């Protein structure tokens, strides 16, 4: 379970503090995406499909969580701010709000250690279930130790719980936002996951979606309302343990990592230059050109989302178009060899409102 | 006036044309004979032979972008021109694409007519890197003009090519801050209809995948006011044409336009695309001291010497000054005396060069110079827009044909309209192991295209301009009946000219081009079998889609991505995310695809259930959920020639010279 500076989970006692907390939630949900997407983009087209599907599905749900947080913020009369340079964290670096001191989010190619050290830490439930790994060859992978409860730090769960509680205390009268700002295009997410936030009940239900998709419930690795999908932590663990997590009546917990293989074919992974910055690529080089294009498209995407979440929800469709353009640009970028190294170019996720 | 206006903004920088090239060979549209190798780069063999495969950029995305385009100069209403930083807030700003939408796309009308490419969904804005932009608008998709392949004398084929894109930005928004710039106030006050006139000139394109500047080229641009009743895609003014051969005069100058603005007594020339260069940056090929002037004797021809008796010089053109092209975008302006203004109304303009050697000159140089290129005979210029129409089966379209003499309308001008008729052999490729499918003929049946001539339909004839010198070409079509077999519809070229105009009077590819789509019965309850041939063809031709996003030839993949496909196929054609990027799908086939996708979305097809089951937990994939795909396209082991347009043009020239004369 990620830990955050306690002040973020305490003292949410005015609407303005609540709005600040929700803006932080938007930033936090976004902050993991460049790391997930970099790992996803490092997978060559048509290879490592299981891992790609897992990371892709987690990424898509982080986008949902960002949307939900923005919907709640809009509902309580706030205005999500997404199109500013400071919105993008510095990589490598910590998550917003001092989340999990010591955890460094890096941009790199898909490896088991990246998934284990970073992704599973991001998504770790408050009480992770240590489902057994039945593959002897993988016994060297130890289960992630349950995080010690460090005094003085709250968890992400606490953070969302504090928001939920504050909303409950403040009541329906804080829902002064324009309902037409709600982003609820159910083409992309079903109505039980993405719905208008208009009052205490819908806001608290929306927060529950975020928490349960990320962490599952204490009793089950599955999200409560979606039998088909595992919570992120367990979904990602399948990559580390190289097996699908399946029901297993022989195990006391009822589950084990003993399903179909989830391998990583190293030939299907681009050897991305880790934590790259555009200035690392020589001026005039193809890597520089395409990296700048990537950043311009990424910034355009943030701008499109900003517009979407600030009164023009129909613009979500255009934003989704930009997500595809971003992927195509990334696919070009990661195939560019960096001369004199064994690396290929990597996306840098830097703010670039103009392509220069 | 358009961009040839005292009030104008000049920018220069880089353009990107990441066009896909599998569709450069029409034979690749034949699903039956399509080979996976057609999705690979061209392969050059050690002995110099090559296998064209999918040409020079099979994984192109279609993106058309303006990159690092800086505002380098501003023309003001008083005729002055400023380029020192700080002289106006707009100087040093950037002309860029959209800040919050997908990139524009560069789109051909058809593999059998690749010389009318147009940007679609291209937003253009003036920005300092912060929002909101000072102004922004959407480029109206008009095709490029005056394409030639011999501009850079030190390059070959597509890299040597150059062309102009003239159009308007529509629905232009202005920021309040823009009014801080005196220039922008003048521009906003001068323009009309919520539009701005824009002209790009593009050259120095790199199509070699091994080059760091792959898919990039040089662009110079000009933005000015768009006035009422002006054409949007060309200058209705003074037309300079090579005398004897297409596409350039003896001095290496190709077709270009100018205009004389009587209120400001200024002669404007658009030399952005006209003069030969020696490198990709646009360094001019020196052809001596060049002046703009007026031929007192209208019979003086190109490549003959002038004298003070038969030539009235106006001004020296500093085309050879350092970075002149990048600093001016090739727009030259010169004030006129009373005598010059009066003479210009009745006599042809000319460029005259004086050089030590006068290479190519056939007559004695008397020291006053040689006519490098001159205005058309009698100053006659005929030009039409729109130049491209896409029509679904039985339909109608209209182009306006503008007849002009010495820059003034020719009321009642007769315009001869001729279908080019059957043209064989267009849109194929070269090299070894060529595709086995036959190349279909263009332009037949001619009966599918008729024009309103003397009140009745005819496949050709003469139309007459109104009192403003504008003739309406009213085009009616019927379904051509699938004459090309494996590729939808038919492409028709329409020649238009004032009777007696020479072949060289109009540039190489100046035809009105129609893509008339075939009728297609939309099934009430379409199955995958109904759309499989269409989707498979797109999957074959656009590996960027099929390998990276959605395997369009796969029923399961299309079903899994039904939501995003439905969105893309149901957007307006002008949207940058519209599918297909190529804008070549008939409304009938589009309805069929949408109907099938809607069935999937309603859960009415068996494959839909399977697809969703198989996709869990990536149940609703976004862009990050990669589609099933074939192996990545291999990087070629040899540099490939960027000869797409060149290849097309060479083949067309062979056919056209015969049928056009």
Image: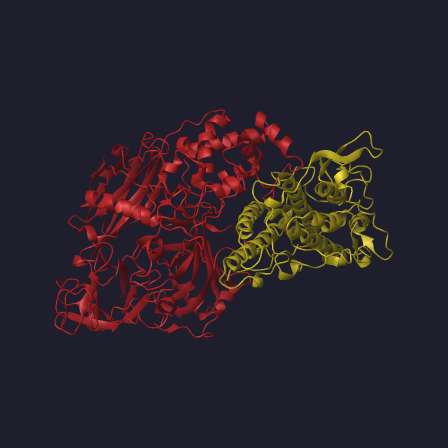
User: On the rendered structure, is B92 left or right of B643?
Assistant: right
User: On the rendered structure, is B83 left or right of A130?
Assistant: left
In the figure, the shade used to draw chain B is red
User: On the rendered structure, is B624 left or right of B538?
Assistant: right
Q: Quadrant of residue B163?
A: bottom left
What is the x, y in percent for residue B307? Answer: 13, 72
Q: Is residue B532 above or below residue B629?
A: above
Note whether residue A87 is visible. yes
Q: Quadrant of residue B202?
A: bottom left
What is the x, y in percent for residue B437? Answer: 35, 33
Picture residue at 46% right of the left edge, 72% below the top? B88
What is the x, y in percent for residue B449? Answer: 28, 36
Q: Determine the residue located farthest toward the front in the rendered image.
A: B47
Note whether residue B137 is visible. no
Q: Quadrant of residue A220?
A: top right
Where, quadrant-wise, is the N terminus of chain B in this rendering? bottom left
């Amino acid at each position: 379970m990620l830990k955050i500076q306690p002040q973020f989970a305490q003292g949410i006692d005015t609407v303005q503090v609540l709005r600040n907390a929700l803006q932080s939630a938007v930033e936090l949900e976004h902050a993991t995406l460049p790391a997930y997407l970099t790992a996803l983009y490092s997978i060559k087209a048509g290879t490592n499909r299981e891992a790609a599907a897992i990371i892709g599905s987690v990424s898509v749900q982080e986008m949902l969580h960002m949307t939900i947080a923005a919907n709640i913020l809009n509902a309580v009369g706030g205005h999500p701010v997404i199109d500013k340079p400071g919105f993008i964290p510095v990589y490598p670096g910590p998550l917003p709000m001092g989340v999990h001191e010591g955890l460094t989010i890096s941009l790199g190619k898909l490896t088991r250690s990246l998934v284990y050290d970073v992704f599973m830490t991001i998504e770790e439930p408050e009480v992770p279930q240590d489902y057994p790994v039945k593959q002897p060859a993988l016994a060297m992978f130890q289960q992630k130790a349950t995080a010690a409860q460090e005094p003085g730090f709250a968890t992400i769960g606490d953070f969302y719980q504090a928001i939920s509680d504050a909303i409950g205390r403040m009541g329906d009268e804080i829902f002064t936002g324009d309902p037409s700002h709600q982003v609820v295009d159910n083409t992309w997410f079903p109505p039980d996951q993405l719905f208008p936030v208009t009052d205490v009940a819908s806001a608290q239900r929306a927060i529950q979606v975020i928490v349960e998709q990320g962490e599952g419930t204490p009793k089950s690795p599955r999200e409560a309302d979606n039998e088909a999908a595992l919570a992120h932590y367990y979904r990602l663990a399948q990559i580390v343990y190289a097996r699908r997590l399946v029901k297993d009546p022989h195990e006391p917990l009822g589950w084990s990592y003993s399903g179909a293989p989830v391998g990583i074919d190293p030939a299907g992974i681009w050897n991305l230059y880790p934590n790259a910055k555009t200035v690392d690529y020589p001026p005039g080089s193809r890597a520089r050109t395409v990296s700048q294009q990537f950043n311009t498209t990424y910034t355009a995407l943030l701008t499109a989302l900003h517009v979407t979440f600030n009164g023009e929800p129909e613009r979500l469709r255009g934003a989704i178009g930009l997500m595809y353009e971003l992927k195509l640009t990334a696919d070009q970028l990661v195939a560019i060899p960096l001369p004199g190294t064994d690396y290929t170019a990597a996306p840098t996720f830097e703010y670039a409102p103009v392509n220069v | 006036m358009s961009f040839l206006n005292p009030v104008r903004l000049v920018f220069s920088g880089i353009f990107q044309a990441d066009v896909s090239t599998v569709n450069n060979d029409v034979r690749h549209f034949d699903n039956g004979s399509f080979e996976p190798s057609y999705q690979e780069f061209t392969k050059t063999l050690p002995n110099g032979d090559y296998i064209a495969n999918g040409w020079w950029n099979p994984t192109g995305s279609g993106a058309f972008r303006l990159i690092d385009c800086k505002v380098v100069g501003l023309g003001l209403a008083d005729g002055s021109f400023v380029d020192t930083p700080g002289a106006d807030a707009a100087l040093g700003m950037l002309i860029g694409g959209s800040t919050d939408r997908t990139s524009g796309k560069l789109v051909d009308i058809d593999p059998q007519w690749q010389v009318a490419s147009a940007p679609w969904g291209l937003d253009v804005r003036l920005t300092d890197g912060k929002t909101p932009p000072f102004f922004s608008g959407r480029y109206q998709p008009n095709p490029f003009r005056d394409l030639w392949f011999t501009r850079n004398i030190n390059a070959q084929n597509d890299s040597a090519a150059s062309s102009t894109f003239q159009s308007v930005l529509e629905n232009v928004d202005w920021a309040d801050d823009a009014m801080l710039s005196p220039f922008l106030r003048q521009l906003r006050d001068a323009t009309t209809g919520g539009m701005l006139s824009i002209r790009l000139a593009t050259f120095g394109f790199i199509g070699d995948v091994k080059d760091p500047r792959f898919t990039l080229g040089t662009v110079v641009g000009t933005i000015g006011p768009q006035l009422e009743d002006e054409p949007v895609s060309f200058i209705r003014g003074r037309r300079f044409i090579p005398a004897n051969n297409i596409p350039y005069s003896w001095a290496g100058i190709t077709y270009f336009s100018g205009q004389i603005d009587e209120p400001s007594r200024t002669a404007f020339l658009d030399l952005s695309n006209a003069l030969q260069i020696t490198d990709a940056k646009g360094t001019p090929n020196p052809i001596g001291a060049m002046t703009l002037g007026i031929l007192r004797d209208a019979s003086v021809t190109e490549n003959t010497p002038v004298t003070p008796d038969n030539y009235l010089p106006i001004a020296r053109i500093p085309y050879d000054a350092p970075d002149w092209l990048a600093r001016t975008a090739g727009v030259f302006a010169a004030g006129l005396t009373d005598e010059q203004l009066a003479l210009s109304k009745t006599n042809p303009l000319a460029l005259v060069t004086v050089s030590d050697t006068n290479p190519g000159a056939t007559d004695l140089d008397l020291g006053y110079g040689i006519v490098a290129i001159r205005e058309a005979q009698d100053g006659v210029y005929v030009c039409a827009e729109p130049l491209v129409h896409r029509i679904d089966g039985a339909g109608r379209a209209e182009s306006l044909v503008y007849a002009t003499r010495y820059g003034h309308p020719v009321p009642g001008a007769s315009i001869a309209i001729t279908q080019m008729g059957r043209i064989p052999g267009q849109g194929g490729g070269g090299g070894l192991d060529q595709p086995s499918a036959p190349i279909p003929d263009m332009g037949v049946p001619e009966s599918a295209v008729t024009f309103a001539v003397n009140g009745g339909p005819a496949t050709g004839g003469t139309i007459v301009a109104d009192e403003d010198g504008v003739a309406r070409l009213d085009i009616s079509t019927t379904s051509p009946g699938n004459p090309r077999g494996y590729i939808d519809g038919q492409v028709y070229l329409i020649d238009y000219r004032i009777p007696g105009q020479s072949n060289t009077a109009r540039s190489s590819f100046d035809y009105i081009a129609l893509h008339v789509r075939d009728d297609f019965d939309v099934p009430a309850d379409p199955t995958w079998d109904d759309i499989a041939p269409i989707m498979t063809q797109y999957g074959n031709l656009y590996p960027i889609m099929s390998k990276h996003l959605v395997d369009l030839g796969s029923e399961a993949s299309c079903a899994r991505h039904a939501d995003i496909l439905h969105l893309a196929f149901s957007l307006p054609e002008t949207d940058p995310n519209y599918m297909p990027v190529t804008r070549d799908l008939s409304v009938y086939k589009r309805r069929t695809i949408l109907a099938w996708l809607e069935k999937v979305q309603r859960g009415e097809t068996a494959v839909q259930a399977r697809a969703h089951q198989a996709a869990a937990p990536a149940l609703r994939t976004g862009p990050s959920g990669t589609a099933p795909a074939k192996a990545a396209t291999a990087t070629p082991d040899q540099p490939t020639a960027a000869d797409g347009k060149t290849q097309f043009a060479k083949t067309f020239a062979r056919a056209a010279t015969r049928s056009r004369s």
